[in-house]
């Protein structure tokens, strides 16, 4: 057995309560925010996923970890998965969640975001925000003494990408070295996937129509991280070339929340980027299909693909719960209340 294989086997046998990545992440991340995947080191991304797998396998061991902790969720946009995964996640660890619907009154309209932060921190232990402007999240984070979590902004969706790579680890054993193809709009989900893939040593290829490529700041950051982790970030405009031999093919809606006024313009531009059986046939035989959901069936993905045995979209949705529980445990110091970590 090669020394690398030996190392991997030894790593796999370290229990979570002795895992150096998890112990270091618990010490560094307690009290911090998660606005972007770029806030995390590679070791911290690995720690969240390792803890996510353990929380999924042993939920009862964590059932008092966030005893009496209070969460507020303030959402300017609709949500099913993110909201429910946070609410049920904290409830199953002994805490409580309060939801504030901000869909008709955006944050910062009635009073400044800084003043909202200075109120919230007096009552709650964590603030979870879904916003249009990414700056709303960073401004809340700067002004709040309690952790702020990005539950989706126009720029990033970090909680989604953590759950997605946890799902890939579950399916393939590890994310390192996987060939991951994203086809569609270079949007918030695409940004967080690029950064997370780079952190975990996955090769990420993104195919978008011209004019819809991911933000250059994210591309630069992802390429810097990828260079350290021995993987590659490629940007293409040809979906067929992007999925050639890929282990995972991912797409998202071509009209994100807040962009509905562009629906008519975007539909023909994104039609060649639809993930259908013909496109999936170019990927590796073992390839999986992924989508953050909600999907617009028979627009960015056909029923035949999303309902096929290759599709792991509901595993992704399930893992939103476990990955977000792991994130909360690290940001709120919850491991101190878990017996095996004593
Ligand atoms: N994928 C995702 O974030 O779903 P929701 O918009 O339903 O939260
Ligand atoms: N890109 C989509 C993701 C929804 C989970 C949006 O922002 O609407």
Image (tube, helix red, strand yellow):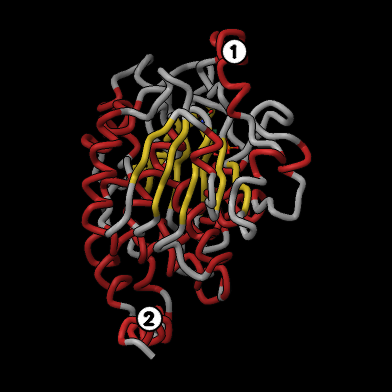
Quadrant location of residue 7?
A: bottom left
> Which of these two is toward me, 176 or 278?
278
| Tag of residue 64 | none
| Tag of residue 263 | 1
Binning the other alpha carbons within 10 Å of mark 2 as few (below 14), some (14 to 19) or many (20 upward) gives few
Q: Confirm if mark 1 falls within 8 A of ligand 2.
A: no
Compared across the picture, whether 159 is left or right of 11 comes to right
| Tag of residue 8 | 2
In percent of width and height, residue 10 lies at 37, 87
| Chain-order first, disc 1 or disc 2 | 2
Residue 98 visible here: yes
Q: Name the mark nearer the viewer: 1 or 2.
A: 2
Q: Where is the N terminus found, in terms of image quarters? A: bottom left
**251 up-or-down from 328: above or below:** above
Instruction: Classify mark 2: helix, strand or loop.
Output: helix
Q: Residue at x 35, y 37 (%)?
A: 120
Q: Residue at x 36, y 59 (%)?
A: 200
């Amino acid at each position: 057995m090669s020394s690398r294989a030996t190392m991997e086997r030894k790593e796999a046998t370290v229990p979570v309560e002795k895992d150096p990545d998890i112990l270091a992440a618990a010490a560094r991340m307690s009290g911090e925010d998660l606005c972007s995947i770029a806030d995390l080191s590679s070791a911290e991304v690995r720690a969240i996923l390792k803890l996510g797998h353990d929380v999924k396998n042993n939920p009862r061991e964590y059932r008092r970890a966030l005893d009496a902790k209070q969460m507020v969720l303030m959402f300017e946009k609709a949500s099913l998965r993110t909201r429910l995964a946070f609410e049920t996640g904290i409830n199953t660890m002994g805490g409580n969640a309060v939801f504030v619907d901000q869909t008709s009154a955006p944050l910062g309209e009635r009073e400044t975001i800084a003043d909202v932060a200075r109120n919230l921190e007096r009552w709650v232990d964590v603030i979870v925000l879904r916003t249009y402007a990414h700056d709303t999240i960073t401004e809340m984070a700067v002004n709040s003494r309690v952790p702020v979590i990005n539950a989706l902004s126009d720029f990033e969706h970090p909680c989604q990408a953590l759950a997605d790579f946890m799902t890939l680890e579950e399916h393939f054993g590890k994310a390192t070295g996987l060939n991951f193809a994203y086809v569609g709009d270079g949007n918030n989900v695409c940004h967080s996937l690029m950064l997370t893939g780079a952190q975990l040593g996955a090769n990420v290829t993104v195919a978008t129509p011209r004019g819809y490529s991911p933000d250059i700041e994210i591309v630069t950051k992802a390429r810097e991280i990828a260079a350290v982790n021995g993987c590659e970030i490629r940007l293409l405009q040809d979906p067929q070339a992007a999925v050639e031999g890929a282990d995972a093919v991912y797409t998202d809606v071509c009209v994100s929340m807040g962009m509905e006024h562009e629906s008519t313009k975007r539909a023909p531009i994104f039609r060649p980027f639809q993930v259908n059986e013909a496109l999936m046939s170019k990927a590796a035989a073992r390839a999986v299909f992924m989508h953050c959901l909600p999907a617009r069936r028979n627009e960015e993905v056909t029923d035949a693909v999303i309902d096929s045995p290759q599709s792991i979209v509901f595993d992704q949705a399930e893992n939103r719960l476990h990955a977000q529980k792991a994130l909360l445990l690290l940001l709120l110091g919850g491991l101190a209340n878990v017996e095996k970590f004593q």
